[in-house]
Amino acid sequence: MHVIVGVGGGIAAYKVCSVIRHFTEAGHDVRVMPTRSALNFVGAATFEALSGNPVTTEVFDDVDEVAHVALGRQADLVVIAPATADLMARAAAGRADDLLTASLLTARCPVMFVPAMHTEMWEHPATVANVATLRAHGSTVLTPASGRLTGADTGAGRLPEPTEIGLLGDLLLTRPDALPYDLSGVRVLISAGGTREALDPVRYLGNHSSGKQGYALARVAAQRGATVTLVSGAVSEPGAPAALDIVHVDSAVELSSEMNARAADSDVIIMAAAVADFRPVGVAGAKIKKGAEGPAPIALTTNPDILAGLVRSRTAAQIPSSTVIVGFAAETGDADGGVLDHGRAKLRRKGCDVLVVNAVGDGRAFGTADNSGWLLRADGTETGLPYGSKTLMASRILDEVAALVPDR
Ligand SMILES: Cc1cc2nc3c(=O)[nH]c(=O)nc-3n(C[C@H](O)[C@H](O)[C@H](O)COP(=O)(O)O)c2cc1C
């Protein structure tokens, strides 16, 4: 596929080199279009070497090829990172005074702006209006991360991590309408990852959950405009997604208390964490020694059923009746039934609105980038979730959620 990577004149321009590499390694034909000021930060030679294609900023180069029209037309995706305040202002106004902005006017593919700037610039009414205009034109404008900016400043305006830009770009390549800005004002609480049940100060009982599906849900919900709190157990994800609050927990009991504390202030609760059913009865105060007589049996006790508890709280009106509750079931078939039979039984048992069922075992679902499954609804209807990235699966699950959230 043809991917245009536009680069604005911001200090984060160097980070886009990893984004270019992400798309070339996936086998796409990448054209890098820096603005004139972007070349003050990273040289054209770097972009040419990384993309394997010529780099120009001007509409008056390669005039015989009518590049200012042709490149935009043939693109399957345009990613602009960093999208500076100036570049978004020019794009929102429909200016075409360099090759990148001219190409934006001829592109009919998904366009994703990835802003990066100081907090004051991001929050200025002019920038806010330009972002709204670009979204109204059908472009995706990511919400930046908060954190360290240039110099000693911190605040909203940091470029999301290149891996996140790559994941969301891939999503738009497979599903062009996957990132509508339709969850603004919706408060979403998501749990992700696996719990760790301590045995002693150095050991725990854990599980193989990577957190990828829960993180993908949090990432996509945040970029669709939701106010997201991610309660994260142990994960093998490299970093926190942009534009959300993250709370770290270890055990099922901690996860339970963090979820319950926030449930009443959430419009949507998604339980994607792999919560241990059992925990050791006691935690040894000192490391358990090998001993001559071999290992002692570990006595276990049952953990709280967080999903069922949240549904009970809703029934008891401790959380609003309009709260949408989504559960996950990682199932293997056994002598009592297949994956879907177990999923249907779990949905009835838990009483949530939607249950996402994954088949696990034999290397499926845990830790992989791709996934498939079924979406079971309380009314008995079911939809297959075809094989694809966990980000794609997240976008489909959130479509379901968006339809269930009451009008706001
Ligand atoms: C060192 C330095 C860093 C800058 N970083 C940013 C930035 O992160 N975001 C931004 O919007 N503008 C930034 N600017 C200002 C832009 O470079 C300037 O507005 C320029 O006109 C942007 O042009 P463009 O349309 O090519 O992006 C920076 C300027 C300098 C000198």
Image (cartoon, helix red, strand yellow):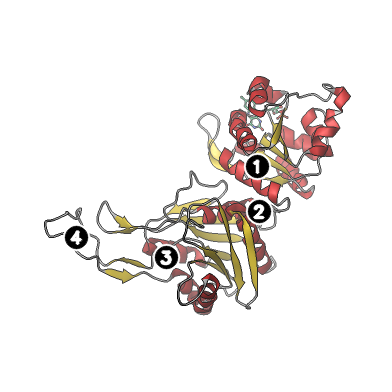
Q: For the residue carrying disc 4, how many other residues have a C-alpha within 10 Å: few (<14), some (14-19), or many (20+)? A: few
Left or right of 257, for residue 268: right
Please name whichever residue, 358 or 61, is drawn nearer the observer in this view of the structure. Answer: 358
The residue at which mark 1 appears reads as 123
Look at the image and tell me in which quarter the N terminus lies.
top right
Say which label, 3 or 4, has the lower sequence index: 3
Identified by mark 1, the residue type is Glu
Image coordinates of residue 35 in percent, x first then y, are: 73, 27
Q: CA distance from mark 2 to mark 1?
A: 18 Å
Q: Quadrant of ligand 1?
A: top right
Amino acid found under the numbered disc labelled 3:
Ser
The residue at 87%/23% (across/down) is 63
Q: Earlier in the sequence, mark 3 or mark 1?
A: 1
- Residue at horizontal 60 percent and vertical 71 percent from the top: 376
* Count of labels in the image: 4
Q: Is residue 90 visible?
A: yes
Q: Nearer the viewer, mark 4 or mark 2?
A: 4
Rendering coords of residue 148 (x, y %): 52, 36
Distance of mark 3 from mark 4, alpha carbons? 30 Å
Q: Is the CB atom of the residue marked by disc 3 within 8 angstroms of ligand 1's nearest atom?
A: no
Answer yes or no: do the residues labelled 3 and 4 have beta carbons within 8 Å? no
Q: Is residue 156 visible?
A: no
| Label 4 sits on residue | 295
Neighbours of disc 2 within 10 Å: few (<14), some (14-19), many (20+): many
Q: Give above or below for 237 relative to 250.
A: above
Give the numbered dot on residue 189.
none
The residue where tag 2 is placed is 224
Instruction: Determine whether label 2 and label 1 are within 8 Å by CB.
Output: no
Residue under circle 3?
256
Cα separation between marks 2 and 3 = 26 Å
Which amino acid, mark 4? Answer: Pro
